[in-house]
Amino acid sequence: MENDRWNTPASKQGEEFEMIAKTFQGLETVLATELIELGANNIQIGRRMVSFTGDKELLYRANFQLRTAIRILMPIKHFRATSADEVYDAVQEIDWTNYLTNETTFAVDSVVFSTEFRHSKFVAYKVKDAIVDQMREKTGERPNIQITNPDLQLHIHIAEYDCTLSLDTSGESLHRRGYRQETVEAPLNEVLAAGIIMLTGWKGECDLIDPMCGSGTIAIEAALIARGIAPGVYRKEYAFEKWPDFDQELFDAIYEDDSREHDFDHHIYGYDINRNAVAIATTNVKAAGLSKEITIAQKDFADFKQPAEKAIIITNPPYGERISAPDLLGLYKMIGSRFKHEFTGGTAWVLSYREECFDQIGLKPSLRTPLFNGSLECELRKYQMFSGKFNDMRAEGGDIKTAQERRMMADHKRFKQHRDFKEKLEDNPHDRFKRKEDREDIRRSDRKDFRRENREEERRDFKRGNDRKTFKRGDDRKDFKRSNREEGRRDFKRDSGKPYSRKR
């Protein structure tokens, strides 16, 4: 892409500029830690993103080395807009001859969380129209739109009325590493797999086992982490390589820099009961050049035995959405049994979606981390195995949680209590309000039913009680009935009524 007028924040040699790294919700702190290690400045954590500043070298390194980033954006304009026309006007204020020529192909991607802008594609169309109209007015011709692999990829993000227009420096999503040759149904995203491993704190200090490895994503990402190999080493191209100011010499130096790589003295094992999955995983491991670090084999987790060497288990079993199992709950019950009886003293991490599945494991997690797998709100749970019974272990002074894990669990509980992922901002506000009204009606109905059942149960207990027979005859009968009735009313008001008089 040739453009003599090309002028972006990265064009000025040595100067720092703003960048945004996108990620999955739940991995923001992991991504921020990666950016600190790369030397980024002014790091700010947001929702599914981390903003930071750096120079052109950091831009290249962020794309090449970050494991938990989906893409790297370079903002070129921040503005507020309350209508599509205001978006159009703001985009027209940019001199697009600094970025485009009539021979340049471009595309616009959009992400919208707003009650005003409910259709993200419409916003993208308005941005495209503003650019095309300006270029036609200035040059007499219009640039070409190309959805796949354009010369210039633009990204518009709207949160309510706050808009950010950026250049996409990555192009194809960074989770597409380049080593995956084949895939199973519903494979785990590479960025999410790397994030899960980094959340566990594992860096290669012991063996790692994935007993349900699928296409081998966790095993391969673990080997890259253990060896210190950059995830971009397999990738063919980035969007910034098409820019007129692309510094080939600088990028080659980053690509050839192996100072972070090191030996891995342990081993990674990937097992799966499915023969086809084992074949696919084996192919992907060979394509990544990691056959020395990873062993893939067909094995049923029901036959799992205590490893001879110290190991950690990290796995993503089926959870009945995109893929399932003939007996899903039985599968999780078996997982819990293998953990308990054949992984004593070990630590296991399980990513899953359904609470019913986690319940079948039958073990108390020491840590629960909310994560998104696509649109599914999942949890990554840590299980610390010990011998004997939990109460006996506690009586001997043992514990499955560290002080830090207790603090993290408290934070996650507060986080989950105040979120409602089903209420997306692009929903109709009237529908959102109606859902809240329906929930309040259900709560009120539940409270009434509970009061009615509690009152009837109290009456039945009183009628069946032995005191009725004892005091049926005698002078104290009237006094007892009066005092018991009054006392019962007071007890009922105090014990049953008060807790449900609070607003919820």
Image: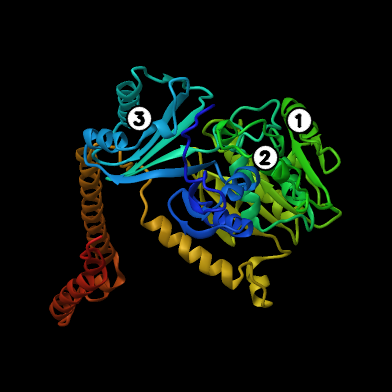
Residue picked out by circle 3: 124
| Left or right: 317 as drawn, with respect to 312 | left
Q: Hey, what amino acid is under mark 2?
A: Gly
Q: Is residue 90 visible?
A: yes
Dot 3, crowdedness within 10 Å: few (<14), some or many (≥20)? many
Q: How far across and how far down the image is residue 210, in percent?
A: 72, 44
Q: How far across and how far down the image is residue 367, in percent?
A: 57, 60
Q: Hey, what amino acid is under mark 1?
A: Val
Dot 1, crowdedness within 10 Å: few (<14), some or many (≥20)? many
Quarter of the image that includes the N terminus: top right
Residue drawn at 77 percent across, 27 percent down: 279
Q: How far across and how far down the image is residue 452, in percent?
A: 21, 56
Quarter of the image that includes the C terminus: bottom left
Quadrant assignment, res 275? top right
Q: Secondary structure at mark 3?
A: helix
The mark closer to the camera, 3 or 1, is 3
Tell me if label 3 and label 2 are in contact, CB under 8 Å. no
Residue drawn at 32 percent across, 24 percent down: 138
Residue 232: assigned label: 2
Residue picked out by circle 1: 278
Q: What is the distance, in whole Å, between disc 1 and disc 2 at their CAs?
A: 25 Å
The mark closer to the camera, 1 or 2, is 2
Colouring mode (rainbow / by chain / secondary structure / one colour):
rainbow
**Sequence-first disc among 3 and 2:** 3
Q: What is the distance, in whole Å, between disc 3 and disc 2 at their CAs?
A: 29 Å
Q: What is the distance, in whole Å, between disc 3 and disc 1 at their CAs?
A: 42 Å
